Amino acid sequence: MNIGKTVEIVKEVLKDFEQYIGDRKNLISKLSISNLKSNIPKIEMIGDLNPDILDAWGVDIKSLETFSKPIRKIEIIPRVPKKISKDIIYTDFDMNFWSVSQYVFTNLPENENFSKLKEIIKKRYVKNIPIIEYLAGNNTEEKISLLLSHFFNNLFIKFISNNISDEIIVNYVDILKNELELRKPEFFLFYELEGLNLQGDRIELESKLEIKKIQKEDFYQIDDFAAIERKNRIRLFRPFMLKIEKSFEDQREIDEFKYWIFSILRLYKLGNIAEVQSFSLKKIVTRPHILKRQRQESREAKYDYIVKKNEIAKFKDFYTTVNKIYLENKENNDFRVILIALEKFNWALTESTRIDRRLTYAVMGLEPLFTFSNEYGISYKLGLRVAQLFSFLGINPSEIRENIKSAYDFRNKVVHGGTYSDDWEKQLEELLPIILEYLRISLVIYILNISNGFDNILKSIDLSLMDGDERKKIEKMISRYKDRFDVCFEDIIKN
């Protein structure tokens, strides 16, 4: 499909629609309270007129045969007109979707330029038409007509909203072409966030992916592709959101992408970063629709953090670095071990409300990072290796070994059954964030140094207990990123 040629044809259709709207505007402007009552036949000429407009002129409609067919049977009771200008009435009329639907289904099929577009599509994309998702119709001809009806319906709504331009027309034609060529559609994705705040309005992590302060205008952006009644206001709970505009193959690909973005945000600092609610819109012509998902219970994040203005550059650097490593290594066997540990970390932060289970997930996350398969004495070796790694951050190894032992004991009670002490909840409230920090920092160190090989890192931790050269390897491995991402490490070093 030639974009330029198609745009010119679309503009001709819009001219015809503009004439149609102009004619109806002139008709409505001639109406008044005095002649409306004596000229009921004129009402039949504007059968799709929204009763709200009549109401604005001071008319009560007592009975109405149907809203979907021309008005033929009404009883008019004149009353004191509202003080409202014709411009406002015209705006109300402009936003009347009935007029658009009337034109699309009655006038559009007879339009010469509409027929031209049908022939262009039929000639070039006849094999693709049956494959297009959501496209109803008994045959190719009907399917193409329906596709173009959806296409022009959206453009006409933009037109009557006084929000049309050459750029918008080109954008719509490009979306139509992508759909006809069966390309990946682009999505608008909005995730209202809890657990993360910004000192500022926005951080652009990459092109068309940002964390920003929520503005209602962000949600009106999706009006371009799906009809949202503005009276149905979106209720918001948190001040910031993750906003994504990106092409995806399907929902599975969206979920995988979102999962990794949220994981990076949780790795930067300890935070229960989660979506309170989400809105997604598939930018397609055939069936643009909004999917809204809201958590059953919105809760205050137990752990949260603020990205301060003076650390925005480091925050973006952390995201870019970790994301690049993930994209380059996600299919490697070594990295899959990290992904297993990361999954348990995410579970411990977000999925379980029982604190003993959350602690169990955190310990289960540490196990694949610090033990070899089929090893004996896991509790002892886990404590020894975690303590050795964190000693390079200046943390007391004895304290770490004691914390790991306590956590592993609780883990065994959950898994195998056991009796809890009376103050076990208080103990876990203190212990859980400590173990989560061990797991978070360990994941960061392993991810940033995965080029060394997972087994090699673990062996170096063991050997560094006795070998000076291996100690230098670990020191170099940590110091390489400790200063660069100092904000990421500062909380555990402080504590």
Image (cartoon, rainbow, N blue to C red):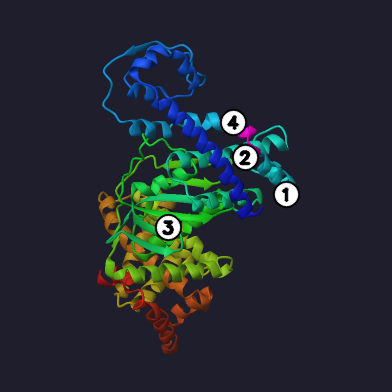
Q: Which residue is mark 2?
A: 147
- Counting residues from the start of the chain, the first of labels 2 and 1 encountered is 1
The residue closer to the viewer here, 39 or 218, is 39
Magenta-highlighted residues: 106-113
Helix, strand or loop status at disc 1: helix
Question: Who's the residue at 40% across and 55% down the image?
Answer: 242
Question: Who's the residue at 45% across and 57% down the image?
Answer: 344
Q: Which residue is mark 3?
A: 262
Helix, strand or loop status at disc 2: helix
- Counting residues from the start of the chain, the first of labels 1 and 3 encountered is 1
- Counting residues from the start of the chain, the first of labels 3 and 2 encountered is 2
Numbered circle sitting on residue 124: 1
Above or below 463: residue 224: above
Q: Which residue is mark 4?
A: 107
Dot 2 and dot 1 residues touching (CB under 8 Å):
no
Q: Nearer the viewer, mark 3 or mark 4?
A: 4
Task: State the CA–CA distance, disc 3 to disc 2.
Answer: 36 Å
- Residue 49 lies, in percent from the top left, at 45, 24
Whether residue 432 is visible: yes
The residue closer to the viewer here, 67 or 156, is 156
